């Protein structure tokens, strides 16, 4: 005799709201380090190497944890894994807030990196408890609030660190994450475990992927310093290629690979990943260049703004980024991913070109940054919602984790490349980059973004994995 599976409990607005609040708080906690690296370097007596390590540690941890979280969520249930993951994040935020020095802060950042894995787990829960159309809208809201939370974190990190202390910069969003986790535990219904894949953890793939990411970030970050030492730079590149080849070989043979290369090879899967990466590179370069240009001494260019003033400049972009997620999800549901992605790429390209040409007033950059935030929110949300609702239910976590992995890599790579450009454009004996280096950065970011149109032209009107 067969039994009929129980009908899943429907997730109400309160449950979706709780997941959204968690995404907002997590995004804020994720982003507080980036705008405050100079302040942390001064307070913790860090050199450039320590600053670079602090900048890349959380993205790398997030990139490793995200596919693992997605796979565990598909296997054991999204909510069950989500709550356990957020306990780790809360511990990490607390460690960062109480850290007396760099080693403890680095440990906290490693634990905090797990927060990126919360998004695919949220999508698993939404997918199982809502219809396809409702899922797209809910995923759009959650994705948009995560992006918006990142903007809020960047907006408030500097003023909080300056007016209170660096400890409160981590403590306040950590408290918000704790409250949001309790809400999710109380309001979100449990989802059933799939249980079809219980082959264990792909530890060799995880270690090799970590090696790939660390080597990639170090190559980008120290490319300028190693330009005078070509053998060392070539050695890093060779090591990176060897690690990538080894990782691919391991994943192809693994019984339960960390990243399923067969899933990644599906046309709309890899196209969505490439598009997300390119958009996030453009976004991250724009954020880095704009904030640096605002803070640069106003000698013909730059505005000499402090952290609080820069926060006010970022406010419009924060609001736009928060709204762009729901807009992207709704637009994708009506018109398909291709139209949203194309519009987003065009908007961002024009905004970046505009900032390269006109940046003599602070409001020029405010408008440009808001348009970049709008485009990023539209594209990333459209890619995520399209993929999340087109794959099989037991692939939701893995598929969306791949998109989020490319987002993390794109944001980290773009910011670091922007830093390399400004360092290369800083005249000898000066601490201020030349105006031409900012213009070059905006132009390169616009070119990378515009190339994404080659991908959107080949996409179906809807994302079909």
Image (tube, rainbow, N blue to C red):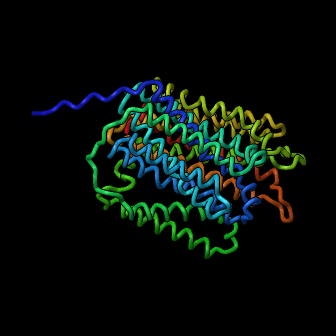
Foreground: 37 or 411?
Answer: 37
Quadrant in which the N terminus is drawn: top left
Q: How many marks do you count on the picture?
A: 0
Foreground: 198 or 337?
Answer: 198
Residue 102 sits in quarter: bottom right
Give how far across and how far down residue 307 sits, in percent: 78, 45
Q: Residue furthest left?
A: 1
For the point 72% across and 57% down, which residue is it?
A: 40
Give how far across and how far down residue 41 sits, in percent: 73, 60
Give how far across and how far down residue 23 sits, in percent: 53, 38
Residue 325 sits in quarter: top right
For the point 59% across and 42% down, which residue is it?
A: 175
For the point 65% across and 65% down, which residue is it?
A: 222
Residue 129 sits in quarter: top left
Relative to residue 422, is residue 276 drawn left or right? Answer: left
Give how far across and how far down residue 188 sits, in percent: 42, 32
Relative to residue 5, is residue 332 drawn left or right? Answer: right
Quadrant in which the C terminus is drawn: top left
Relative to residue 243, is residue 353 drawn left or right? Answer: right
Residue 457: in sight, yes or no? no
């Amino acid at each position: 005799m067969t039994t009929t599976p129980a009908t899943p409990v429907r997730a109400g607005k309160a449950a979706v709201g709780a997941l959204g609040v968690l995404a907002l708080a997590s995004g804020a906690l994720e982003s507080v380090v980036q705008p405050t690296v100079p302040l942390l370097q001064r307070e913790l007596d860090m050199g450039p190497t320590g600053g670079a390590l602090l900048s890349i540690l959380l993205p790398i941890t997030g990139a490793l944890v995200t596919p693992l979280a997605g796979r565990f969520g598909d296997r054991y249930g999204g909510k069950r894994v989500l709550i356990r993951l957020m306990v780790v994040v809360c511990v990490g935020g607390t460690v960062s807030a109480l850290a007396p020095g760099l080693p403890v802060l680095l440990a906290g950042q490693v634990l905090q990196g797990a927060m990126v894995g919360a998004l695919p787990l949220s999508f698993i829960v939404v997918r199982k408890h809502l219809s396809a159309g409702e899922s797209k809208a809910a995923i759009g809201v959650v994705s948009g609030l995560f992006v918006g939370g990142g903007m809020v974190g960047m907006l408030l990190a500097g003023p909080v660190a300056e007016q209170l202390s660096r400890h409160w910069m981590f403590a306040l969003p950590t408290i918000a994450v704790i409250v949001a986790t309790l809400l999710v535990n109380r309001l979100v219904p449990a989802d059933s475990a799939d249980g079809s894949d219980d082959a264990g953890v792909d530890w060799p793939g995880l270690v090799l992927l970590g090696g790939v990411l660390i080597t990639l970030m170090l190559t980008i970050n120290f490319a300028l310093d190693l330009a005078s030492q070509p053998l060392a730079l070539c050695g890093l590149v060779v090591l990176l290629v060897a690690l990538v080849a080894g990782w691919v070989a391991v994943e192809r043979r693994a019984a339960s690979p960390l990243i399923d290369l067969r899933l990644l090879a599906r046309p709309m899967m890899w196209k969505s990943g490439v598009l997300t990466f390119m958009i996030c590179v453009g976004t991250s370069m724009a954020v880095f260049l704009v904030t640096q240009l605002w803070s640069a001494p106003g000698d013909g260019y730059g505005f000499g703004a402090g952290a609080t003033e820069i926060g006010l400049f970022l406010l419009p972009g924060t609001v736009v980024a928060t709204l762009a997620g729901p807009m992207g999800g709704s637009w994708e549901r009506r018109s398909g991913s291709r139209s949203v992605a194309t519009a987003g790429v065009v908007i961002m390209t024009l905004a970046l070109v505009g900032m390269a040409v006109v940046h003599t007033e602070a409001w020029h950059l405010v408008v440009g940054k808001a348009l970049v935030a709008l485009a990023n929110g539209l594209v990333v949300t459209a890619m995520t919602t399209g993929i999340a609702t087109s794959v099989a239910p037991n692939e939701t976590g893995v598929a969306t984790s791949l998109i989020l992995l490319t987002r993390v890599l794109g944001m980290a790579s773009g910011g670091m490349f922007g830093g390399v450009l400004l360092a290369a454009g800083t005249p000898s004996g000066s601490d201020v980059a030349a105006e031409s280096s900012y213009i070059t950065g905006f132009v390169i970011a616009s070119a990378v973004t515009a190339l994404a149109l080659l991908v959107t032209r080949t996409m179906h009107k809807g994302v079909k994995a």
